């Protein structure tokens, strides 16, 4: 059996705290050095070794300060990612554009929720998908509902529930009523565009039966997108011939390093399905980095919030 989600998050919070502690220690050491230099300003000239160590520490402290600034600014610096995926079930030359967002984790004070509709409208989507985790607190409900309402005016907007949405504190909240968003729970709907019709199915956590029930509603042989919250749904979807699975949940780790990726692991799938585009048999999987942040991990580093623009393109 894999680790529980609670154990995963607890481990990741400890890892993040260690990283932040290391940065804070560098900044503290640099401050102490400055105080020491001020105290010895009129004393004897420091040794070459001391001066070299001081310069190295200042460089490290400078990098630490940049890391802190980046971590604080990135949550407000979204990135639009464009992905093109061939789909043999679409007519040749047809294109279906899906804009996916995930993991808003809205709170009383908006972060990107007010800007998202304008950014997404500029992409001219045929449909919009939200793949779960709406809130970090009940106070964030008005912010979330306002964002969803504005999105639904742009294009057909579909959503599924994530693990945070099923917690006892949120389970009874009316997140989508009156917003115009279609909540999919073991359901599927067709979305027509100029060149074709794509079926979008969706299932809330937990249980493969929900995915099975959603896909049972899709006619055979049609272009199909499955919305789910966690990457674990791709294995079953691949067996059922789904063309594209859109998920979130991982946040891309929220804290990443160049050339390595996520430093912390927010998912049972780990680095197997960390962030971005993957292939499972004939099924494509897109793992969205999400917009918001876990309540216990309020920082992003080398992992900007993501708006994914996915074009399904018909091929011969």
Image (tube, rainbow, N blue to C red):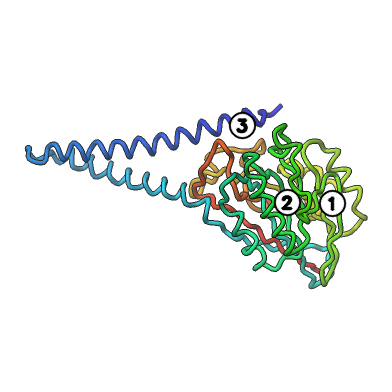
Q: Is residue 307 above or below residue 11?
A: below
In the image, is 173 to the left or to the right of 50? right
In the image, is 265 to the left or to the right of 239? left
* Residue 282 visible: no
Foreground disc of the pair 2, 1: 2
Q: Position of residue 70 (x, y in %)?
A: 44, 50
Q: Residue at x 62, y 63 (%)?
A: 119
Q: Residue at x 69, y 56 (%)?
A: 100
In the picture, the quarter occupied by the N terminus is: top right
Q: Position of residue 316 (x, y in %)?
A: 82, 69
Q: Residue at x 91, y 47 (%)?
A: 216
Say what secondary structure mark 3 lies in: helix
Q: Are marks 2 and 1 in contact (CB under 8 Å)?
A: no
What is the distance, in whole Å, between disc 3 and disc 1 at their CAs? Answer: 31 Å
Q: Position of residue 313 (x, y in %)?
A: 76, 66
- Mark with earlier residue (2, 3): 3
Say what secondary structure mark 2 lies in: strand
What is the distance, in whole Å, between disc 2 and disc 3 at their CAs? Answer: 22 Å
Q: Can you identify the residue that label 2 sits on? A: 246
Q: Can you identify the residue that label 1 sits on? A: 241
Say what secondary structure mark 1 lies in: loop
Query: 10 Å neighbourhood of mark 2: few (<14), some, or many (≥20)?
Result: many
Q: Can you identify the residue that label 3 sits on? A: 8
What is the distance, in whole Å, between disc 2 and disc 1 at their CAs? Answer: 14 Å
Q: Quadrant of residue 197?
A: bottom right
Foreground disc of the pair 3, 1: 3
Q: Residue at x 65, y 58 (%)?
A: 308
In the image, is 121 to the left or to the right of 240? left
Q: Are marks 2 and 3 in contact (CB under 8 Å)?
A: no
- Mark with earlier residue (2, 1): 1
Q: Is residue 196 above or below residue 145?
A: below
């Amino acid at each position: 059996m894999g680790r529980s989600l609670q154990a995963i998050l607890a481990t990741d919070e400890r890892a993040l705290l260690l990283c932040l502690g290391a940065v804070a220690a560098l900044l503290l050491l640099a401050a102490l050095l400055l105080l020491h230099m001020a105290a010895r300003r009129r004393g004897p000239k420091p040794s070459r070794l001391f001066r070299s160590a001081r310069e190295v520490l200042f460089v490290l402290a400078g990098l630490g300060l940049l890391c802190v600034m980046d971590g604080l600014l990135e949550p407000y610096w979204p990135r639009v990612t464009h992905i093109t995926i061939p789909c043999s079930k679409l007519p040749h030359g047809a294109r279906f554009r899906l804009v996916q967002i995930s993991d808003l984790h809205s709170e009383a004070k908006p972060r990107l929720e007010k800007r998202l509709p304008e950014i997404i409208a500029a992409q001219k989507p045929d449909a919009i998908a939200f793949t779960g985790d709406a809130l970090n607190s009940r106070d964030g409900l008005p912010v979330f509902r306002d964002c969803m309402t504005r999105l639904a005016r742009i294009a057909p907007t579909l959503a599924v529930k994530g693990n945070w949405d099923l917690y006892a504190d949120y389970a009874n909240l009316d997140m989508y009523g009156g917003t115009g968003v279609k909540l999919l729970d073991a359901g599927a709907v067709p979305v027509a565009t100029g060149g074709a019709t794509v079926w979008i199915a969706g299932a809330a956590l937990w249980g493969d039966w929900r995915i099975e029930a959603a896909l049972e509603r899709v006619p055979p042989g049609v272009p199909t997108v499955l919305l789910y919250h966690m990457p674990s749904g791709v294995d079953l979807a691949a067996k059922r011939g789904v063309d594209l699975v859109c998920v979130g949940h991982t946040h891309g780790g929220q804290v990443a390093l160049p050339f390595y990726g996520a430093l912390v692991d927010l998912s049972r799938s780990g680095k197997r399905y960390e962030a971005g585009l993957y292939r499972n048999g004939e099924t494509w999987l897109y793992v969205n980095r999400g917009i918001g942040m876990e309540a216990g991990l309020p920082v992003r580093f080398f992992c900007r919030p993501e708006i994914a623009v996915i074009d399904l393109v018909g091929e011969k």
